[in-house]
Image (tube, rainbow, N blue to C red):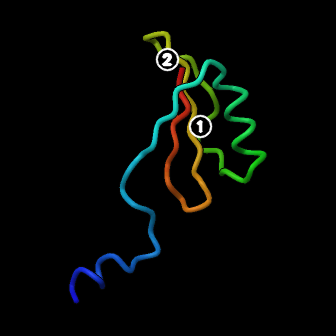
Amino acid sequence: MIIMKFCSSNLPAGMEIDFVTDDVSAAFLRAVEAGAVPVAEPEIKPWGKTIAYVRDLDGILIALAS
């Protein structure tokens, strides 16, 4: 009963899903057009990789990275 009560929350799972792509900007725009909520627009990080974040329709954080 405790487990069922714990899992019945409407909050998203505490995780992040990462997808690697050659074109982060295009993937970001496509995700937002499909209904994802933008969190952070594509940005080139100091280590040279590009990364952007969106939340899917269930609120799960999605990283789009090169």
User: Circle 2 is placed at which residue position?
Assistant: 45
Q: In percent of the image, x 72 and y 45: which residue is there?
A: 32
- Please identify the quarter of the rendering in which residue 23 is found: top right
Which residue is located at x 68 percent, y 32 percent? 27
How far apart in space, not on screen, are marks 2 and 1 (Cα)?
Answer: 12 Å
Residue 49, given in percent of the width and then of the height, sits at: 50, 15
* The quarter of the displayed image where residue 13 is located: bottom left
Residue occupying image coordinates x 50% and y 54%: 60
Q: Residue 15, how many percent across, how many down?
A: 38, 50
Q: Amino acid at mark 1?
A: Ala
Q: Is the Cβ of the residue at disc 2 closer than 8 Å to that at disc 1?
A: no
Q: Quadrant of the C terminus?
A: top right
Amino acid at dot 2: Lys
Vertically, is 6 above or below 19?
below
Residue 55 higher or lower than 28, as above or below: below
Identify the element where label 2 is drawn: loop
The quadrant of the rendering that contains the N terminus is bottom left
Residue found at the far right of this picture: 33
Total number of numbered labels?
Answer: 2
On residue 22, the disc is: none
In this rendering, the answer to whether 61 lies above or below 13 is above
**Location of residue 41 with respect to 60 vertically, above or below:** above
Q: Which residue is mark 1?
A: 40
The answer to which quarter of the image holds residue 12 is: bottom left
Q: Residues within 10 Å of mark 1 (few under 14, many from 20)?
A: few
Circle 1: element type:
strand
Q: Residues within 10 Å of mark 2 (few under 14, many from 20)?
A: few
